[in-house]
Image (tube, helix red, strand yellow):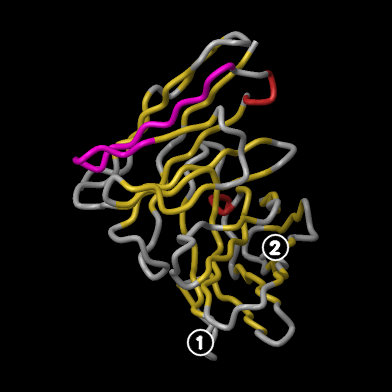
Amino acid sequence: KAGVTQTPRYLIKTRGQQVTLSCSPISGHRSVSWYQQTPGQGLQFLFEYFSETQRNKGNFPGRFSGRQFSNSRSEMNVSTLELGDSALYLCASSLLADSYNEQFFGPGTRLTVL
Amino acid sequence: AQTVTQSQPEMSVQEAETVTLSCTYDTSESDYYLFWYKQPPSRQMILVIRQEAYKQQNATENRFSVNFQKAAKSFSLKISDSQLGDAAMYFCAYRNEANQAGTALIFGKGTTLSVSS
């Protein structure tokens, strides 16, 4: 079974631009979560989606948004990019939106904002 | 709000030796899950071991075991017979029992483990 895939793997943008990152969960998984990883702040939770509904959102500004499609694929969008948005963005999928099921992580998208 | 603290930014161990990584957490919940994740240089986050808070028995996965002290809110990871492939950053993580607020993982800052031959 294929793992979680994230595209693109690397991205370079300039301040003020917007960016869309994509995540395809493991087949059959219906829950997708997004995390931001930076050297300073570590791993921080962004969003959680289940069956196209956002169940939970982390403490990030409104420039960060996301959505989930009917096939469980998810996208996250960051508008008006800032230098501090440079980070590794990790997507994780799980079978259901419960704490028991393991979250499987993708390889991440490395975003650099210049 | 729940927090996870890893007080050791870096640790080192020699091959075949044993090392223990520390983690403490803070929560007012009684039902929750604790995890150790490994992140090698490839950045692929891999689950090492998990512990359900309602279970008194410490979890074990091959060379990896935990010491879960619920009253002390402590969750350490012991790696026995360390191997070069164990070199990575290790994250301790907490997750509430599912509720309306979702099931987000709360991570510690991580411990970088180096293994020497």
Residue drawn at 44 percent across, 69 percent down? B98
Quadrant of the snapshot with the C terminus of chain A: top right
Q: Is residue B19 left or right of residue A1?
A: right
Query: Is residue A71 covered in magenta?
Result: yes
Q: Determine the chain carrying the residue at label 1.
A: B
Whole-percent x, y for residue A67 in the image: 36, 36
Q: Residues under labels 2 and 1: Cα distance? A: 19 Å
Q: Which mark is residue B54?
A: 1
Residue B99 covered by magenta stretch: no
Q: Quadrant of residue B11?
A: bottom right
Q: Which residue is mark 2?
A: B3
Q: Percent from the top left, x then y, of residue B49?
A: 49, 68
Q: Residues within 10 Å of mark 2 (few under 14, many from 20)?
A: few
Residue found 69% across the figure and 49% down from its top: B112
Task: Report the amino acid beneath label 2.
Answer: Thr
Q: Which residues are magenta?
A: A67-80
Q: Position of residue A17 (x, y in %)?
A: 54, 11
Q: Is residue B51 visible?
A: yes
Q: Is residue B116 visible?
A: no
Badge 1 density bin: few <14, some 14–19, many ≥20, Cα 10 Å = few
Q: Secondary structure at mark 2?
A: strand
Q: Residue at x 52, y 26 (%)?
A: A110
Q: Is residue A82 above or below residue A57?
A: above
In the displayed structure image, the side of residue B70 where residue B65 appears, left or right: left
Query: For numbered disc 1, what is the local secondary structure?
Result: loop
